[in-house]
Image (cartoon, coloured by chain):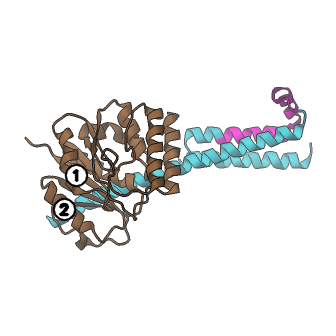
């Protein structure tokens, strides 16, 4: 086993711990926690046993191992971006609800102060 | 007993003619309760709306026209509205059309009335690309929902309160919600009627821009996949 494999696996473990901490702090939903843990889990497995990628070659019918890695990387980036986008939309929704609630509360407070 | 009618007007930095618009509305429909939702304007002047009978709700930040409309809808529902109307604040809609557009819902003929600028031939000036753009969106909306409308992007609408109650939880768009709301109205099989309104050209309107068109396409794609 090469040093780079150990470093990669250690980074993966660190990222999983961060995901779990965020879940405990209720920053992440259960769905997001599961998705991120899966992604980093796969990363750890790939670092510790890179030859596992060879099994994917018949499925993807790719002759080049590098190409498989490239496709997986693009998929990974796509999942990550869509996850960030979903989080952003969720935050946007929460802000909207908050501003709308404040607008109604401000109005009612103003009315009650006037009386 | 006459129904409780609320008129929701979202506004964002449209200072000049706004008080005049409000007094015109009062002249044509004196019994309507006006709810102005200021969407985080930087030009807001409290004296601008000096009528005690007008409700002024204020968003602390700018969210978008449809977020402001939803706030107005929430207020209206909480205060016992039977009928809720909406119109733009930039002078695109003429208050003189309000009695006509309200009438079919007041008489119970329909659930939603859509003010259409295309039912009268040669109805005022409209930029060509905007005209064709609206026709394209009418066609695309028909493909998605199966309902044929002549002016699907119009913001001059009247709803039975029940309609708003049903569709409000589904509405997500903050700025470009016209097609989204119509989609949910058709999905719930509410009756829609179109009534002719005057077309008043407004240079201030954000509608008709490339960004607006792109976002309507995005929403059509989204609701088409639902």
The residue that disc 1 covers is: B97
Quick one: SS at disc 2? Answer: helix
**Chain letter for the part of the structure drawn in brown:** B
**Relative to residue B7, is residue B19 depicted above or below?**
below
Q: In 3D space, how far apart are the residues under numbered discs 1 and 2 (Cα atoms)?
A: 11 Å
Q: Which residues are magenta?
A: A36-62
Where residue A35 appears, x then y in whole percent? 64, 39
Answer with the quarter of the image where residue B201 lies: bottom left
Where residue A58 appears, x then y in whole percent? 85, 26
Residue B210, numbered circle: none
**Relative to residue A113, is residue B158 depicted above or below?**
above
In depth, the one of A52 and B176 nearer the eye is B176
Residue beneath the point at 15% across and 64% down: B52
State whether the magenta stretch is mostly helix, strand or loop. helix
Was residue B36 drawn as part of the magenta stretch in this picture? Answer: no
Is B191 positioned to the left or the right of B96 in the image?
Answer: right
Residue B24, numbered circle: 2
Discs 1, 2 touching: Cβ within 8 Å: no
């Amino acid at each position: 086993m090469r040093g780079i494999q150990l470093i990669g696996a250690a980074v993966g473990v660190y990222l999983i711990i961060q995901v779990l901490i965020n879940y405990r702090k209720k920053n992440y939903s259960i769905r997001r926690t599961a998705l991120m843990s899966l992604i980093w889990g796969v990363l750890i497995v790939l670092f510790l046993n890179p030859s596992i990628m060879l099994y994917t070659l018949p499925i993807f019918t790719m002759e080049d191992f590098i190409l498989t890695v490239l496709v997986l990387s693009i998929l990974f980036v796509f999942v990550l971006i869509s996850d960030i986008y979903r989080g952003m939309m969720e935050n946007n929704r929460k802000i909207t609800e908050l501003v709308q609630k404040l607008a109604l509360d401000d109005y009612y407070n103003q009315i009650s102060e006037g009386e | 007993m006459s129904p409780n009618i609320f008129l929701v007007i979202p506004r964002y930095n449209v200072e000049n003619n706004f008080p005049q618009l409000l007094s015109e509305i009062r002249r044509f429909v004196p019994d309507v309760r006006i709810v102005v939702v200021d969407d985080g304007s930087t030009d807001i002047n409290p004296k601008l709306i000096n009528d005690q009978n007008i409700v002024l709700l204020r968003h602390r930040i700018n969210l978008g026209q449809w977020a402001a409309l939803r706030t107005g809808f929430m207020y209206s529902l909480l205060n016992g509205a039977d009928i809720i109307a909406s119109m733009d604040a930039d002078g695109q809609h003429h208050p003189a059309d309000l009695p006509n557009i309200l009438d079919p819902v007041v008489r119970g003929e329909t659930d939603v009335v859509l003010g259409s600028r295309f039912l009268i031939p040669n109805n005022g000036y409209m930029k060509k690309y905007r005209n064709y753009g609206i026709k394209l969106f009418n066609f695309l909306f028909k493909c998605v929902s199966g309902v044929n409308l002549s002016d699907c992007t119009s913001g001059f609408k009247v709803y039975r309160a029940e309609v708003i109650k049903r569709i409000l939880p589904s509405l997500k768009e903050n700025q470009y919600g016209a097609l989204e709301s119509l989609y949910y109205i058709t999905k719930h099989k509410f009756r829609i009627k179109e009534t002719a309104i005057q077309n008043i050209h407004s240079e201030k309107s954000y509608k008709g821009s490339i960004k607006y068109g792109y976002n309507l396409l995005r929403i059509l794609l989204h609701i088409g996949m639902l």
